[in-house]
Amino acid sequence: MEALNELFLPNYRYEDYINWEGDWELIGGIAYAMSPAPSIKHQEINLNISSQLKRLLKECKNCKVLPEVDWKIDEETVVRPDSLIVCDLDSSKAYLDKAPEIIFEVLSPSTKKKDRNLKSIIYAKNSVKYYILVEPAGNFAEVYKLENGKYYLEGEFKKQSYNFKFNSCEIEFSFKEIFENI
């Protein structure tokens, strides 16, 4: 069956991806449609994440917060995390071409499986230090930290804070703030 897949499944590259209409991710040459317009709750949570990160990183001149930016990992893989922190960024490009320190994915019913499984493997392989899965349905987040090439669950957070250490920065992130007033 694998040989049939290689013969008949399309294999897209970055030059194809940049010409597509709509919102897509490209993983291993396979196109994945992103969920239809995210829910209002999804968008509010993502805005709260990015706003808090921006405020916390105000003094850190090396690192930037970017919401929904393309990360081109290679010619056959382009992902678009909900929010991320990247340090020592070359901002002259239209896309991110280096691994972020932290990635937040706000889960949607249609992308949850891909975010939990496939993206977790991709992010670990590309040395993303922290991967946070935010579950709007239950108002909680899971923080995973990369150690020896694998993610380990640091904990499940609703109202607690977590201390992220990366590059030369350290921030105390409040999960309570991302779920407040939603």
Image (tube, rainbow, N blue to C red):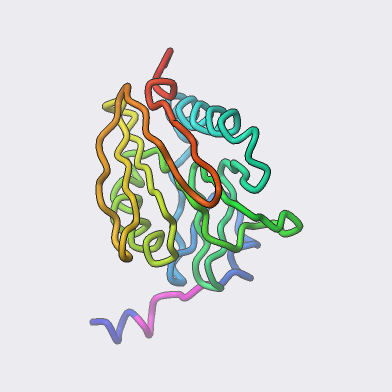
Magenta highlight on residue 8: yes
Residue 152: horizontal and vertical position, in percent?
A: 26, 52
Q: Residue furthest right?
A: 92
Magenta highlight on residue 173: no
* Residue at screen point 26% across, 27% down: 138
Q: Is residue 140 above or below residue 72?
A: above
From which residue to which does the magenta span run? 6-12
Q: Which quadrant of the figure contains the N terminus?
A: bottom left
* Residue at screen point 40% across, 36% down: 163
* Residue at screen point 48% across, 49% down: 166
Question: In terms of image quadrants, where is residue 155?
Answer: top left
Q: Nearer the viewer, residue 10 or 50?
A: 50
Q: Nearer the viewer, residue 79 or 171?
A: 171
Q: Residue furthest front?
A: 168
Residue 18: horizontal and vertical position, in percent?
A: 64, 62
Q: Which quadrant of the figure contains the C terminus?
A: top left
Q: Is residue 147 above or below residue 102?
A: below
Q: Nearer the viewer, residue 112 or 130?
A: 130
* Residue at screen point 63% across, 40% down: 60
Residue 147: horizontal and vertical position, in percent?
A: 31, 59
Q: Is residue 17 above or below residue 11?
A: above
